[in-house]
Amino acid sequence: MRLRFILSETWTSLTRNVSMIISVMLVTFISFLFIGASVLTQAQITKAKGDWYDKVEVVVWLCPDGTSQSASCSTGKAPTQQEIVDLEDVISNELGSDVSKITYMSREEFFKNTFLKQYPNGVYEGRTLTASDMQDSLRLKLKDPTKYQVVSEVLTGRTGVEAVVDQRQIFDPVFSVLNRATVVTVVLAGVMVVVAIMLTATTIRMSAASRKNETEIMRLVGASNWTIRLPFILEGVVASLLGSLLAVGALSGIVKVFVTDWLATSVQWMPFITQTTVWLTAPCWWWGPCCCRRLRPRYRCDAISRCDLPPRVVRDVRSMR
């Protein structure tokens, strides 16, 4: 009987304050939209960073045939196979504790398996390139990716080595921009959450004030404080819940239209969040981002090895501009 009475009073309160309920629902919707956007942005960063950093390599570009700006390539010739073997021995002896795997990639392999996948016609910046324009390289898999500086200090300037490139440097600026975007959305979400809380509290007070006589009668007949208060509290909870559900639905639609159906099909080398990510992270919008740390990336990306080009190619193309 008491539950039925509370639900009846809640429904009456909802129908009497439709405009205020809609206001609370919209503010809650916008608040959780910002919160969800920040959580999903961070989830996208974690997915991409976790997938790419697991496969990140240090690329040791060997000297090309011809001119080079590096003093270690002053001979104008690419290193011989014996010189490459000697360099691999240096890496094994001096960096054995930091390097877990050494992979030699010839310029022909790089052109066929990497360059042509990104540029199918072999055209880069208006110039048609061939395997002879590429460079041999050594790909080093580090046990600890943060030890790049140690590897660079040992190999930079050695005969036969033109440049040492850490592939993380390619993506760090992108992640920096995304992290700043996350901070902005978090700040906006925080402001909107405060507004939503204040508006919900105001709605409850106004609803209670409009039914002051009824609550006085209920108190006189012996109703407990919780019996009187609960319908007003449920009114705010229902409005907030509807707003949050609308936010989840909106973000799910946005992810499907702009990410799953568009970006994921256009940019296939990058792992993207999905609608599953939206529904898995939705509880975090209420309980905080700490519960989302277990959401690990499960996509693989083969683009990390083809996001860099030989220094010779970049240098020659720039000189033509």
Image (cartoon, rainbow, N blue to C red):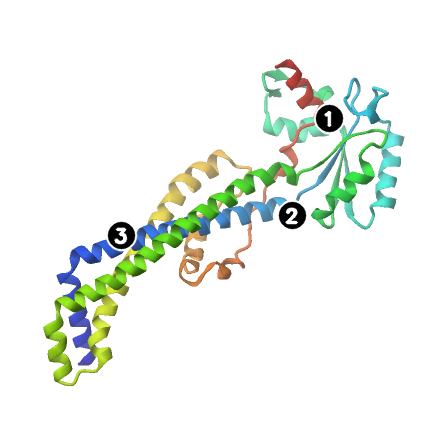
How far across and down, in percent of the image, does residue 291 sit?
49, 62
Q: Name the amino acid, label 1.
A: Glu
Residue at image mark 1:
108
Q: Secondary structure at mark 3?
A: helix
For the C terminus, which image quadrant?
Answer: top right
Query: Can the viewer see residue 223?
Result: yes
How far across and down, in percent of the image, does residue 300 sit?
58, 45
How far across and down, in percent of the image, does residue 173 sit?
58, 38
Residue at image mark 2:
54
Question: How would you rate the neighbour count of disc 3 (Cα within 10 Å): few for under 14, some for 14-19, many for 20 or more?
Answer: many
Eyeballing the image, is 99 above or below 138?
below
Quarter-of-image position of residue 258: top left
Task: Tell me how far mark 2 sits from mark 3, CA to CA.
Answer: 41 Å
Residue at image mark 3:
26
How far across and down, in percent of the image, does residue 195 sit?
31, 55
Q: Name the amino acid, label 3.
A: Leu
